[in-house]
Structures are given as structure tokens and as C-alpha cells.
Amino acid sequence: MNDDGPIPEELIARSLAGDEDAFAALYGAYAPGVYRLAYGILLHVQDAEEVVQDVFVYVYRSLARFDPRRGAFRTWLYTITVSRCRNKRRRKWLPTVVLSHLMGQGFEPSGPHRETPEAAVARQNVRDALTDALGGLSPRLREAVALRYGQGLTYREMGEVLGCPPKTAESRIRLAHEALRRALSAEGELLLEELWGF
Amino acid sequence: MGILNFNFNFNFDFKRGHVTGKLAAYLHGELTPAERARVMAHLKTCETCRAALAAEEALAARLRAQFSPLTHPRPGQLARLWPGIAARIANTRPPRRMRFAHRSVFGMALTASLLCVMLLPLLLGGRVPVSRADGSATQAAFTGPTLPPGAATAIAQLPGDTATAPSTHAGQDSPGATVTPVPTPETKG
């Protein structure tokens, strides 16, 4: 089962009856998506982990409020996640995380085997540039990018999660594209300048 | 890299019919058929928007390829979080639906008890106000508020509420008189 699958009605029903094993299964199915979304918004490992914990404790306590007629379980879960990320952001100024720090801690997925050092550095630079560009987005735009490119949600689904009309979701994606393009172009030009300097 | 060499102002106005503001939605397949047709027709004739589309495609491809791997949890990371969640759940109350059910039962029992306490004086001490056949009302030993003359008759004559009193009541008040009791639990019993 994955987070794109059908609503796990049975798991929800068993969890409501107090079956912690069923809730553990629910966690196993949906935690990766929640973490990816939280990390995509916060760009901070520890904060994302705390959000995952908070989200699932809240979900356990509030599972009875979930109404499948009003929307998909995943949408409900991501709405809670975005809300928790906003709370986390309010309490703590968002730090900029350089990807190389994460790689030093082993958080980065391993690259292709037999990668040359030059290729590894180039790949790291490209990802660092993207992370920096994402970090420069406003929180609202980063939420939109995380939902679209991290979760593959449609504009309508994004609107449900973010509490805005689909047109607003579309607008945020467009603005995020513009900002990312500017940031990445600037970084690219800087890299080119450095290369010419050599 | 296409996006690096592309220097284009995406904020220009739409007076010339440019569709740059719709290109992200176009790439994501989020336009209506009419909008899509308009964008495609414009792209056929506009070099500027075609260049903008190429830049959009490059950025979208990069985000699709690199965003998701960037956010993947490392192996074992989420499993490490579960014990903390389980501990917090263990210390919490059961899911709300069960608590709600318990609360409902408790609430209904409490309401029923209160109603019984409130109605007990009426059930035990109240007398039945009756109206005689000649229209005069009698409220002997009625502990509630005094009804105005004729009110008991009016209440008694509500549709479906009129009944012939048992002969024992009729005999106590006025032998042979027809009485119309106000429906109370006592009279129904």
C-alpha cells in the first residue's frame, strides 16, 4: 500500500476501535508522503520529523472527524501536515539548509555507483542550487511546489489542501516558477562567471 | 542548460495575446480545452512564447527529477520516529468516535434523570384540569400556573386530543357530565 492508493477504510475502522497495530500500518503507508511534504516545505530534517510525529498523534486523536464523503484521506492528512508546518514556521525562523550538510550526515540518497568525484561534485552543486532556490521562495509558494512536484497533486487537490481556489494554486505555481527561474538563472550565471574566471 | 541562457521577462502584459502566464498550467495539463486550444494556437505564431515554453519545460523537468529525491526520507528514518508516536498515543485517550459514543450514552442518561426530577412533582401532585360540558373550567388541586377561563377547553379540543373521560372521573366531578381531560401522563395512564 502506498500513499496514492485507495482509502484504507479497514485500517481506519480498526484504528478507531483502538487497534494500535492498524494505526501502525496506517503510519507505514502514509508517513513517507507526510515526511516528504513536511521536508519540502520546511527544508529542515528535525522540524520535518517533529511535524510527522505531531501529525500522526493528531490524526490518531481526530480520526473520527475524517469524513470520506468530504475528501480523500490523503488530502485530509496533507491539510493537517501543511497546517503543522505553518505552526512550526511561526514558532521558529526557517533556517537555510545547505544540502552538503545533509549529505555529510548521510541524509542524501546515494548517487549512481562508480560516480567520478567531478560528477559527484557537479551533481551536488546542481542540487545545492535547487535547494537554495527553494529556500528563497516564500512559504506559500514553497507549499505549492511541494504539493505539485513532491506529491503530484492537481491544482484542485492543492486548493483543497491549502484552503484556496484552484486558480490560486495555479497562480502560486506560476509565481514559484518565475522565482525559481530567476534564482536558478542567477546561480547559473554566477557559475559561468566563476568558470570564465579560471 | 536552457534555463540558464534564457533571459525573458515573464511579467509583461497580455496586450499582445501572449500566453506566458498560462504555460505552467499548460504543461501540467490543467487548462480547460478552450484555454488549451488558445495557448496552442498562439504558440504556433509566437516565437517569444515558444521560447518561454521551452524555459518552463526545462524548469518543470528539473523540479520533477530533483525535487522528490531531495525530500525522500533516509532508510530507517521514519521507523525511528514510530516509538515516540506510539508512546504519545498510548498516553492519550481512545479515538473520539468511541468517546463520543460513551458521552452520548452518559448524556442521554443524565438528561433523562433531570427530566424525571423536573416532572416528578407534576406526575405525583398534579390534578387533571377538566372542562365541564357546560364550558366552565375546573382546576382543582392543579399546582401549575392558573389557566385562563376556557383555555383548558381550547387545549382539550386540539385535534386528536379529545377523549371521553373515564366514568370514575365523571362521577367524582359531576355525575353524568361529559368531561374532556387535558392529556397528561396521569390521564393517559
Image: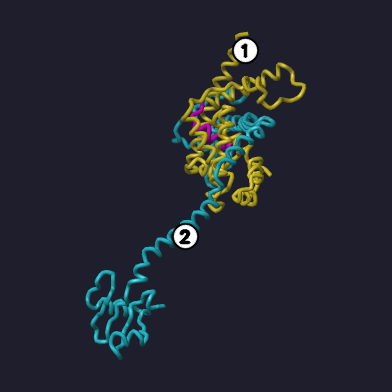
Chain colours: A yellow, B cyan
Pointers 1 and 2 within a single chain: no
Q: Residue B143: name its quadrant.
A: bottom left
Report the amino acid beneath label 1. Leu
Type of secondary structure dominating the magenta stretch: helix
Q: Residue furthest right?
A: A114
Residue shown at the point (61%, 22%) measured from the top left: A99
**Looking at the image, which is closer to me, A39 or A170?**
A39
> Is residue B149 part of the magenta span, yes or no?
no
Residue shown at the point (62%, 12%) measured from the top left: A195
Report the amino acid beneath label 2. Ala
Q: Residue A48 appears at what percent x and percent y?
A: 57, 31
Residue A42's disc is none
Label 1 belongs to which residue?
A195
Residue A42 visible in this rendered orientation of the protein: yes
Q: Residue A176 appears at what percent x and percent y?
A: 52, 31
Q: CA distance from mark 1 to mark 2?
A: 81 Å
**Badge 1: residue crowd in 10 Å (few <14, some 14–19, many ≥20):** few
What secondary structure is found at the residue carrying circle 1? Answer: helix
Label 2 belongs to which residue?
B109
Q: Residue A196: name its quadrant.
A: top right
| Magenta-highlighted residues | A136-148
Residue B30 visible in this rendered orientation of the protein: no
Callout 1 touching callout 2 (CB < 8 Å): no
